[in-house]
Image (cartoon, rainbow, N blue to C red):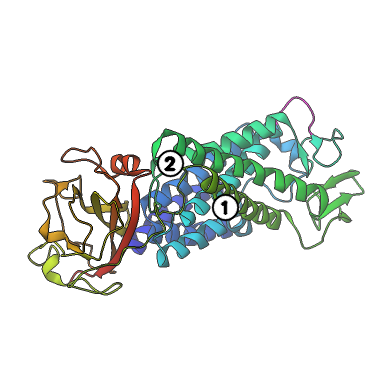
Amino acid sequence: MTLLLGFLLAFAIALAAYLKKSLNRSGALAALLMGTIIFGLGGLSWAVILLVFFISSSLLSHWKKSSKLVFEEKFSKSAKRDAAQVFANGGLAMLLVIVNYFQPDNNWVWLAFVVSLAAANADTWATELGVLAKKNPRMITTGISVEPGTSGAISIHGLLASCAGAACIALPALLLWQGTLPPAGILSNILVFLIITLSGLLASLTDSLLGATVQAIYYCPQCQKETERHPLHTCHTATQPLRGWHWLDNDWVNFSATAAGVGFAMLLGLLLSQSTFLNLDGRFSNQIIPFSSPAFSHGNFIPQTYTCQGEDQIVELHWSKLPENTQAVLIVMQDTDTPMGRINHWLVTTPIASTDAGSSLSIPWVSGKTINPDGGYMGPCPPPDPAHRYYFRLYALSKPINVNQGFNFQEAVAKMEGLVLGEGKLMGKYKKQ
């Protein structure tokens, strides 16, 4: 069902882009495939990030188009994107959505997905806006002034556009965060925003560096100019190899720069996670608490009695001895496979007097906000097909968090920072009968 919905949405957008001449036929087919996978397997939040990239970059390609026509002889292709360009910019994002579908419990996959599109957007904005600067750009390797549109050239105008393009992806990514845990607190959100934006900028600079050194560049003897076009220039003269690796065309450069942006983000994230309180691992603690249910084992199907098709009984959960000094626990149950992203089906916290083994049914809880309009537990209730995965998480806290009935998960995450002594995790599936 979700794939069908993804296909219909992707078809509508690809068709509109084709009619608007933002994509040619192969580009529209590639966008249809990519959109179906990202919309269908990722859900709405992942699709929104893709749409922000696609719409903003397409609008900029058409903005002041007449002023950019003079630079087309520099570029390998026109503003009407083909399949290779679509996959060069969004192929890595599509692969990451597939990874997330099979391994949804990971902050890093969401961050990598976002950065891959931030990198593509940064490079597109730098190109589309950079060529409109009044001053000539300079080669990134030599600093020599060159014509606008030259591969490997950068300018202040282009660098600022690159930062803006990456930030345009970073902001909705924070608002729609689909990792295991959202960044907690204002400073953590600022750090993640800077990681995404800076990684996009570095990816754009990587694109310029590759363009100045190893990208295949040709020479038109008729126009006596450098160009990315081959085998024919815009004047229909055969172009001759000038420098670079013959197989490394602009599409491969774009894909490589996008991958480099993801690499930069992973490195920055690891460094900041080690040196600050920024939590990108999706874990507050490395101490694992054995966490289970007598109703089902990890990875297996949840019995119907605990779902909307049965009695909607609260799933009984058991934990072994909690870490020393534990004074409270928090449990959250999330559906990770909805088109709207992660949905809370149960969210509770309470102080506890003992660190001994315990059960979720033997404690009075303060309930948080869930999909249940009346608050409290709502059992699995997915569409008919396919099965959804439901993650139950237990957090052992060094002191109770100050929340009221109806608190939300983001509020709890912010208040749990620095208090988590250990974590437990259990995953069950359910498919509507």
- Residue on which the image places disc 1: 266
What residue is drawn where x is 48% and y is 49%? 50
Which mark lies nearer to you, 2 or 1? 1
Determine whether 7 is above or below 150 in the image.
below
Query: Is 136 included in the stretch rendered in magenta?
Result: yes
Determine whether 369 is above or below 346 in the image.
above
Which element is circle 2 on? helix
Nearer-the-camera pick, 6 or 100: 100
- Residue on which the image places disc 2: 174
What residue is drawn where x is 63% and y is 37%? 162
Q: Is residue 420 left or right of residue 160?
A: left
Which element is circle 1 on? helix
In what quadrant of the picture does the C terminus appear? Answer: bottom left
Residue extending farthest left: 311
Q: Which residues are magenta?
A: 132-137
What residue is drawn where x is 60% and y is 43%? 200
- Of mark 2 and mark 1, the one earlier in the sequence is 2
Res 367 label: none
Question: Label 2 amino acid?
Answer: Leu
